[in-house]
Amino acid sequence: MVMSRRGSGSLTLPSGQTLAIHTRTHDEEDLPHATKRTMADHLRKYESLFTLTPQRMRMIVEAFKDSLELGLEKTSQIVPMIPTYVFGWPTGQEKGDYLAVDLGGTNLRVCLVTIQGDGKFEITQSKYRLTEEQKQGDGQKLLDFCAECLKIFIDSSLTDPLNMYLGTGGKIPLGFTFSYPCTQTRIDQGVLIRWTKGFGATNTEGRDVAEMFRKSLDKYELPVELTALINDTTGTLIASHYVNPKAKIACIFGTGCNAAYMEHVKDTPKLKELGIAGDIDMAINCEWGAFDSFEHEHLPRTKYDINVDERSNKPGEQAFEKLISGRYLGEIMRLVICELIDEGVLFLGQNTYKLENQYVFDSAFLSLMEGDPTDELLMIIGIFSHFFAVETTLAERQFFRALAKLIGRRAARLSSCGIAAIVSKMGYLDEGCHVGADGSLYNKYPGFADRIHEGLVDIFGEKGRNIVTHHAEDGSGVGSAIIAGSCFGFIVYYS
Ligand code: GLC
């Protein structure tokens, strides 16, 4: 007789929705499921496709370093190494109230940040989820929406906004964290090079987004002055250093993936003509998500990665990011699952149409699968039955968890390669350094940070332990506020 089992539990999705699971599984019952052995055979195949050896990682690091150097040398390179006009580190003693608008890959956040000195701060914030129409519609409308949310926030959260900055004509300094590649010639300006992370809003690429946002702010007659346009990595770099002076690099592992660090102006040949003193340092937004774009010479891409790339709104671009970031990991896993469905290995006799649409398999599912604490893998039962209306056996669930691990681990190990390239270029290995990191993947994916650390040891040997990542709490909001404040002249910022 076939045993059936009942499981129950609940699972909270990134949207905040809670899903109750009460599921009965029929492991070897009526449906023709794949055997444990078949699943193990398939897993071996994927293991060889998704595993990165230390030797391969070291080769990637070398190529990565060359790309970073090239980006510093000349403009318009694949890894653009964007000068941010944020000069030097904060002292940790900055103080003041600032507003920050953070347009990320998934959400829009509006924050009031109180910088308290001594590396301390407080944040009040509202978060809004962006719709697909907003991401693909008219760019000015998207920025109008940001301004509208800021207006609602100011009206509801600030008791006396106009009196906050009497000495400055009643204007509150605003930092605009805009996490897409922008060419800057000043801190309060930035021309969008290209959208990333699936955005495609029209009439925006090639235009100054700070100027566009000012137009929206004027429309809503807001008592603010946009003083700085900042990438989330630059914000995180400044915020991490404000809290912990050992932090010298910042990374975001979220919907997108990128890094920033502080570079010597004298080592940035493309800045020479500006005549900035060579002993000054400037934060560089690497936009490393673009590493190996178009030519695809260095990164080991599987046919699933190539499929993700070719069906994306920007084929060829963001090659590194497409192997790592939260926007793509679920899609990579979905493509493997679909292949096994097509081969007749998985879900025979079940209706699998819900798995057929692009991006329906959320990357958060991978982290929930890896984090499933139950022997029966109840979380995985819940995901497949609730979202895709298919039943799974324990062998299949174990396979899915192992597959998630392969994809998640590859993402973390590639991330180590990027970090190692900056560390090695800057000569930080012996003295060691901290890396402030933020983003859903880093914060929520079980073991992501440990795997990055493991990767650093694989690349550098024992010395790799000198490089330590840590969660930079709300880097993009706090850093943006510190930078916005420094540009407004309220605080002495340059150290
Ligand atoms: C994408 C963007 C980049 C951002 C990163 C993380 O790579 O191009 O600007 O920093 O996502 O949000």
Image: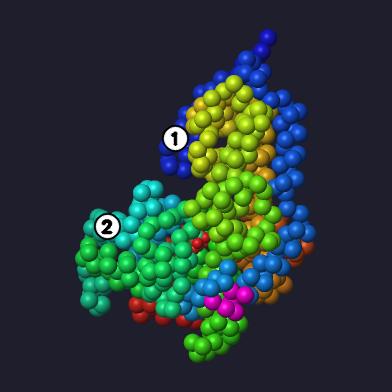
Q: Is residue 422 visible?
A: yes
Q: Residue at horizontal 36%, vertical 80%? A: 489
x then y, percent, for residue 188: 38, 74
Most extreme residue toward the top, as rendered? 1
Q: Reading the chain from its start, which is encountered first: label 1 or label 2?
A: 1
Which is nearer the eye, 42 or 307? Answer: 307
Amino acid at pointer 2: Glu
Circle 1 residue: 18
Which is nearer the eye, 265 or 445? Answer: 265
Q: Residue at horizontal 72%, vertical 49%? A: 51
Q: Secondary structure at mark 1?
A: strand
Is 74 within the magenta?
A: yes
Which is nearer the eye, 174 or 182? Answer: 182
Q: CA distance from mark 1 to mark 2?
A: 29 Å
Which is nearer the eye, 304 or 239? Answer: 304
Q: How many marks?
A: 2
Circle 2 residue: 148
x then y, percent, for residue 24: 56, 20
Is 325 within the magenta?
A: no
Tell me which segment is drawn in magenta.
Answer: 70-75
Left or right of residue 107, residue 458 in this image: right
> Mainly helix, strand or loop, the magenta region?
helix
Q: Is residue 30 above or below residue 344?
A: above
Q: Residues within 10 Å of mark 2 (few under 14, many from 20)?
A: some
